[in-house]
Amino acid sequence: MVNLTEKICVVCNKVYYRKRKEALTSKYCSRACQAIGKRGRTFTERTCESCGKTFSVLPSQLNHRHVRYCSTQCSADAKKNRPTETCLHCGEQFLGFKSRKRNYCSRVCYLAHHKAPLIKKTCPVCRKEFEVVASYADRYTVCSLECRRAETVYVTCKRCGKLFTGKRHQNLSYCSEACRRPPRLISCATCGKRFRVTPGSTIKYCSRRCFRSFRGETSLEAQVREAIESLNIPFKQEFHISRYRVDFAFPGRGLILEVDGAYWHRDQAKDARRSKALEELGWRVVRINENEITEAANLATLLGDKFRESLLLESTQAVLPLFQTELSQD
């Protein structure tokens, strides 16, 4: 049970009760007394339309509908005892007021009874047709208050025209993800694979691997790639092996070619550990550094010598037929 403390209003000397914490600072029994005590406002007497009791209101509130009753209980009782009236236009019964008589249930019926132009609309909730005054066509979107409060609405898809249901607060426009983001297939600029992108996207590659293969190569790797292509040797660039990604791989011969730039490959011990790990996986690792590439008169010949030493061949002329045999098998 809540403990209440008895207090005396400093304006009207009326006895009132407040909670213990509120009683420490409370001086007035109501807002009316608070306005008189703090601001020196004057009030006007008004008679409650429900119980007939006199109560005080501000002069600026005389025309407000919510001050026709002295309390919330009188307001609730007045709503329960409101008279039933019949609309002169549609014939439906509605709750009126004791203080004044109403002939129409709504503004729409009032305007329609006085020959105002009407247009037909379809309720998006119950799909019923209803008439509304032309000047209020934008305001009235549903046929009744029940439909206005309903959560489910019928929406027409902007893309396919299909009618679907949704929640009113979601502001849906499309019936499915396929309509919201229609599939647009493009070809990868590197591997040619067809993949899906969103409308307006500027993506050209199906994966990061293809992006790096096309755009991520250094100038040294570009020179080596052109030399390998001139030899007509099949290869894979930016190839993944376990947790490593190598510059050039020749899977048919188990061969790896790593291009070591002077800046990124200063730690030779790290490169040695990487080569050892790849060799344990069954690959042969060939490395070519920046100085060898820049000083080589013919880079293709240099690569042929590197491949010959790694594959343990007797001559460089035997390297190219070996890879061409692999190309014909593929």
Image (cartoon, helix red, strand yellow):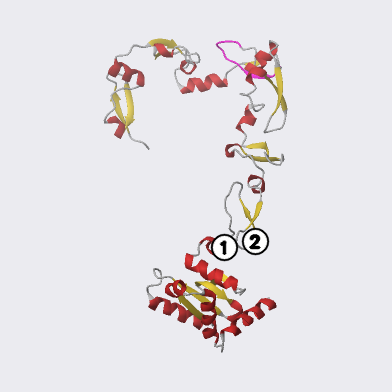
Q: Magenta part mainly helix, strand or loop?
A: loop
Report the residue at 57% width, 73% height from top. Answer: 228
Q: Is residue 58 above or below residue 123?
A: above
- Furthest residue to the bottom? 314
- Residue at which label 1 appears: 210
Q: Which residues are drawn in magenta?
A: 91-101
Q: Residues within 10 Å of mark 1 (few under 14, many from 20)?
A: some
**Which is more toward the observer, 256 or 129?**
256
Find numbered disc 1 in the image and state the secondary structure of the residue it sits on: helix
Check residue 193 in the rendering and tell me which mark sits there, or answer none: 2
Q: Position of residue 300 (x, y in %)?
A: 54, 75
Find numbered disc 2 in the image and state the secondary structure of the residue it sits on: loop
Q: Is residue 128 visible?
A: yes
- Furthest residue to the front? 297
Q: Is residue 176 above or below residue 79?
A: below
**Which is more toward the observer, 305 or 137?**
305
In the image: residue 298, left or right of residue 105: left
Tell me which amino acid carries mark 1.
Cys
In the image: residue 101, left or right of residue 43: right
Q: Position of residue 71 (x, y in %)?
A: 45, 20
Report the residue at 65% width, 36% height from top. Answer: 153
In the image: residue 137, left or right of residue 34: right
Disc 1 + disc 2, Cβ < 8 Å? yes
Q: Within the magenta stretch, is there residue 114? A: no
Report the residue at 65% width, 26% height from top. Answer: 144
Q: Position of residue 125 (x, y in %)?
A: 67, 33
Q: Is residue 255 above or below residue 225?
A: below
Q: Residues within 10 Å of mark 2 (few under 14, many from 20)?
A: few
**Which is more toward the observer, 250 or 245?**
250
The Cα atoms of the two marked residues, 1 and 2, are separated by 10 Å
